[in-house]
Amino acid sequence: MSLLIRKIQIKTTLRYHLTAIRVGKMNKSIDYRCWRGCGETGTLLHCWWECKL
């Protein structure tokens, strides 16, 4: 049962969390960098787990 709950959590996070790339596309901006200021592309994976700041 916990696998089902985890799957639902992941799908919800990926659907509703706005990454820098998605916000940039909505605002028609070409700035897709991480909002923490590291200068890399702001994907969900990067912003939550890979960013060194």
Image: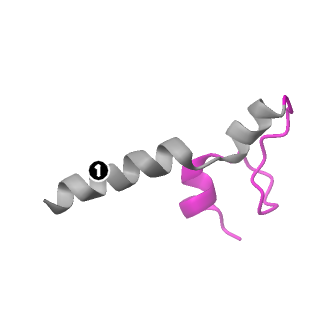
Q: Observer-nearest residue: 30 or 11?
A: 11
Left or right: residue 37 versus residue 7 is right
Quarter-wise, where is residue 48 in the image?
bottom right
Q: Residue at x 70, y 39 (%)?
A: 21
Q: Residue furthest bottom?
A: 53
Dot 1: element: helix
Q: Residue at x 86, y 33 (%)?
A: 29
Check disc 1 and report the residue beneath it.
Answer: 7
Q: Residue at x 62, y 46 (%)?
A: 43
Q: Is residue 27 in the magenta section?
A: no
What percent of the width, then of the height, locates residue 39?
80, 53
Q: Residue furthest left?
A: 1
Q: Residue at x 39, y 45 (%)?
A: 11
Question: Chief secondary structure of the magenta span?
Answer: loop
- Give the tally of numbered discs: 1
What percent of the width, then of the height, locates residue 9?
37, 55
Label 1 sits on what residue type? Lys
What percent of the width, then of the height, locates residue 35?
78, 57
Q: What colour scheme has been applied to the protein in the rendered image?
A: one colour
What percent of the width, then of the height, locates residue 12?
43, 49
Q: Observer-nearest residue: 44 or 16?
A: 16
User: Which of the image's four quarters has the N terminus?
Assistant: bottom left
Give, as a single range, the part of the protein colored magenta.
28-53
Q: Is 36 above or below relative to 21?
A: below
Q: Residues within 10 Å of mark 1 (few under 14, many from 20)?
A: few
Q: Is 52 above or below relative to 12?
A: below
Q: Observer-nearest residue: 30 or 16?
A: 16
Left or right: residue 23 versus residue 16 is right
User: Which of the image's four quarters has the C terminus?
Assistant: bottom right
